[in-house]
Image (cartoon, rainbow, N blue to C red):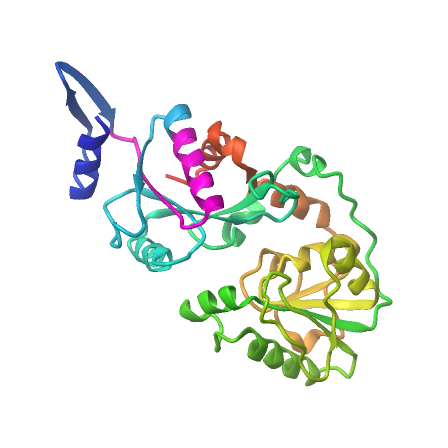
């Protein structure tokens, strides 16, 4: 039956019909008109392969929707799916993602989680998800989530800290900068040059000392003039480096979320979800925003990331369907 559905999906004949009857031997299976044919795209990484495989199982087992696996190397052009699932944007996944967005197809995009990424085994933690974008900003506050998922992580939200001195730049990796440049979101694919631009913009508005922390996974990182190079590894190292931070400045780094939890305000000049809690305008660097809704921000954020077992169980797909984020 799946091969027959796949052929119909590619031709686009699943659209705008009251019902479809598919023959399987002598039996007939009727597919309801509101059934989604979902393209689930493979990823070149082991993590990505596991996540999309679990999403496939979850959609198939716990919903009336029909997932169809696509090899991103063999299927380089968009098909007539009504929804698609991606993990990351490596190889030609970026071009596919952009094509589906141009066609206004619902996209479910996964990447590394905000908290609870797991230690040791890379598949043991949580992975963030965004619908129709790379970040969940557009619908974030409408989630109005309860506190239960956030409480799993046993994290503490510290009081706002207003005594720090350093403006702290959280940098990009080369991979991330390359994707953002291809998307037209930053002016250079070189993360060092981008950090230098950010340093120069900050310096126009303050004489505070500036610290720079490149993305820890980027092996080609190097110091930039006029900043303290803040590279102590791990979460404990990050918290030590943030000990005298006045504000965290980034395009989209998760470091802003760690900062917000520690009571450090943020400036997000790109699409990072923490931008909902701070300014983008660096001319306000001496007057950061100290919002009073960090708890609700954390509650909602916990519902924007899912464990791979929850994907396999169908909980992740069902939640986004029930919220009306996937039609």
Foreground residue among 322 and 49: 49
Q: Is residue 99 visible?
A: yes
Q: Residue at x 83, y 73 (%)?
A: 165
Q: Quadrant of residue 13?
A: top left
Q: How many marks?
A: 0
Residue 22 relative to residue 259: left or right: left
Image location (x, y in percent) of residue 196: 62, 81
Q: Residue furthest left?
A: 26
Image location (x, y in percent) of residue 244: 83, 67
Q: Vertically, is 182 above or below 127?
A: below
Q: Quadrant of the C terminus?
A: top left
Q: Residue furthest right?
A: 163
Residue 14 relative to residue 97: left or right: left
Image location (x, y in percent) of residue 195: 61, 76
Q: Vertically, is 32 above or below 276?
A: above
Q: Is 46 included in the stretch rendered in magenta?
A: yes
What segment carries the magenta color?
33-59
Q: Is residue 304 visible?
A: no
Q: Residue at x 21, y 21 (%)?
A: 30
Q: Residue furthest top?
A: 26
Foreground residue among 146 and 110: 110
Q: Vertically, is 33 above or below 191?
A: above
Image location (x, y in percent) of residue 227: 73, 79
Q: Vertically, is 282 above or below 316?
A: below
Q: Quadrant of the N terminus?
A: top left
Q: Is 315 included in the stretch rendered in magenta?
A: no
Q: Residue at x 75, y 52 (%)?
A: 261
């Amino acid at each position: 039956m799946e091969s027959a559905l796949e052929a119909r999906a590619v031709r686009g004949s699943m659209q705008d019909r009251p019902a479809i009857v598919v023959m399987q031997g002598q039996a007939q299976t009727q597919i309801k008109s509101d059934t989604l044919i979902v393209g689930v795209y493979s990823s070149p990484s082991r993590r990505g392969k596991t996540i999309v495989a679990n999403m496939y199982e979850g959609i198939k087992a716990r919903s009336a929707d029909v997932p169809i696996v696509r090899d991103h190397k063999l299927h380089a052009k968009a098909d007539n799916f009504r929804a698609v699932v991606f993990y990351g944007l490596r190889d030609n996944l970026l071009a596919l993602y952009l094509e589906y967005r141009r066609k206004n197809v619902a996209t479910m995009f996964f990447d590394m989680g905000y908290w609870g990424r797991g230690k040791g085994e890379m598949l043991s933690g949580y992975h963030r998800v965004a619908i129709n974008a790379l970040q969940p900003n557009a619908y974030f506050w409408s989630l109005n989530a309860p506190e239960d998922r956030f409480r799993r992580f046993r994290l503490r939200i510290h009081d706002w800290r207003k005594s720090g001195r350093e403006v702290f730049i959280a940098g990009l990796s080369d991979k991330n900068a390359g994707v953002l440049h291809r998307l037209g979101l930053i002016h250079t694919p070189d993360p060092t040059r981008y950090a230098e631009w950010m340093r120069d913009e900050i310096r126009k508005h303050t004489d505070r000392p500036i610290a720079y922390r490149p993305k820890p996974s980027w092996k080609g990182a190097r110091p930039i003039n006029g900043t303290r190079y803040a590279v102590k590894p791990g979460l404990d190292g990050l918290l030590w480096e943030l000990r005298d931070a006045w504000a965290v400045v980034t395009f989209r780094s998760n470091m802003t979320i760690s900062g917000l939890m520690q009571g450090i305000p943020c400036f997000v000049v790109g699409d990072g979800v923490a931008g909902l809690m701070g300014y983008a305008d660096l001319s306000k660097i001496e007057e950061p925003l100290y919002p009073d809704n960090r708890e609700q921000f954390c509650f909602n954020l916990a519902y924007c990331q899912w464990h791979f077992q929850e994907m396999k169980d169908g909980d992740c797909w069902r939640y986004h369907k029930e919220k009306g984020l996937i039609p």
